[in-house]
Image (spheres, rainbow, N blue to C red):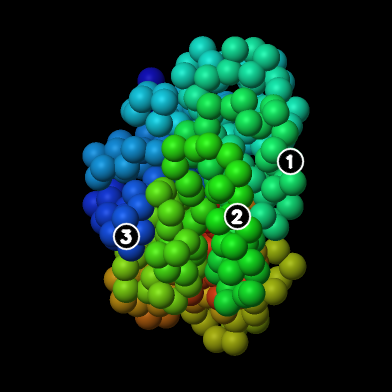
Amino acid sequence: MNPPDPTLRLKVDTAALADNWRNLDALSGEAAAGAAVKADCYGLGVETCVPALRDAGCEAFFVAHCSEVEAVAKHVPAQQIAVLHGVINAGEIAYAQGIGAAPVINSLDQASAWSAAGGGMCHLMVDTGINRLGVAPAEIGNSAVQALEIDTLLSHLACADEDSDKNAQQLAAFEEVRNTVPHARASLANSAGIALGSAYAFDLTRPGLALYGGVPRPELDGSIRQVAHVEAAILQTRTITAGDTVGYNAQFRAEKDMRVATVSLGYADGFMRSRGPGSHLLHGEKRLPILGKVSMDMIVVDLVDAPELREGDWLSVPFNLKNAAQQSGLSQYELLTTIGTRLRKS
Ligand SMILES: *Cc1c(COP(=O)(O)O)cnc(C)c1O
């Protein structure tokens, strides 16, 4: 028996996603834009997003883990999938070689192990200053690195969303490294890096956040559309009287009689407590303030401006990522990737 329709839903606007990719591809100038599709397309769903990106023209897809390859490979050739964490044991090497996805080699050990197992086309991450993954520039001369068959030489910017001297320093370091190892293509910029200008674009850019509606730098402001639209249904309405309190720890106290609605959305759906106080849900243009603490699966909103609403009516969750991040203290990345699986629909 199929379960009934859920009381909360996520609508992914695939036309907006495709537009965002096209705009980022155009902003990448001579370079082609790829797409970071790790973490289930930042929470919005590989099943929905990857075909839309592919149909828009994207030909390079970045996942973090080997375990993420299979879902993406249902929609695009495995050769177009790069695994950012690389291959960290024999099982992962065999898997990448078997399925035909290319690992991003991140260390001398990974380089040697990959070649020893038969090698094949791969990518190479060089660390120019973020100090997470990647071989150091000083290690590039190592024979294990020089023996690799490198498609894309990558590095990753630490501060692309800020005006930091570190951006130019990493760019210079990357330019230098490019002369020291053979590679077919070079790639440095994430979403924010694209906004830093054509010097950062090289042959391939790797936007993630901005594809899904995030705006990491003001330069991207007019180019990015909202992709995620979250809606939740009213479960119950009630009238409370002056002095009544709402929710855990009785944090909201009514000063007068008022009509309120309990809505099917909580922190288990990614609607964190930091988004409660001072924020609201929407019914059309009407703002319905959130009252009291966010519970695991419910929130309560004030119906003073929409007394006609009833059980089963849908409210939308403001999901302008830039505004929601400012209001909640969460990053745009966290807001997206914590969208719960209960919301997923189309
Ligand atoms: C996640 C990731 C990206 C995408 O970054 P955004 O800031 O989301 O555009 C690009 N490159 C690497 C190496 C990443 O890990």
Tag 1's secondary structure?
helix
Q: Is residue 83 left or right of residue 73?
A: right
| Residue annotated with mark 2 | 176
Disc 2 element: helix
Are there few (<14), some (14-19), or many (20+) residues within 10 Å of tag 2?
A: few
Question: Where is residue 193 shown, x and y percent of the image?
Answer: 49, 62
- Identify the residue shown where x is 71% and y is 71%: 250
Instruction: Mark 2 or mark 3: name the one nearer the start of the chain.
Output: 3
Looking at the image, residue 310 lies above or below residue 99: below
Q: Amino acid at mark 1?
A: Glu
Q: Quadrant of residue 277?
A: bottom right
Number of numbered markers: 3
Q: Quick one: 336 or 113, which is closer to the camera?
A: 113
Image depth: mark 2 or mark 3 in front: 2
Read off the residue under disc 3: 29
Quadrant of the rendering where the C terminus is positioned: top left
Q: Amino acid at mark 3?
A: Gly
Q: Is residue 261 above or below residue 22?
A: below
> Going from the N terminus, do you reach mark 1 or mark 2 first?
1
Q: Residue type at mark 2?
A: Glu
Residue 143 image-quadrant placement: top right
Can you identify the residue that label 1 sits on?
Answer: 139
Q: Quadrant of the N terminus?
A: top left
Question: Can residue 321 be spotted in the picture?
Answer: no
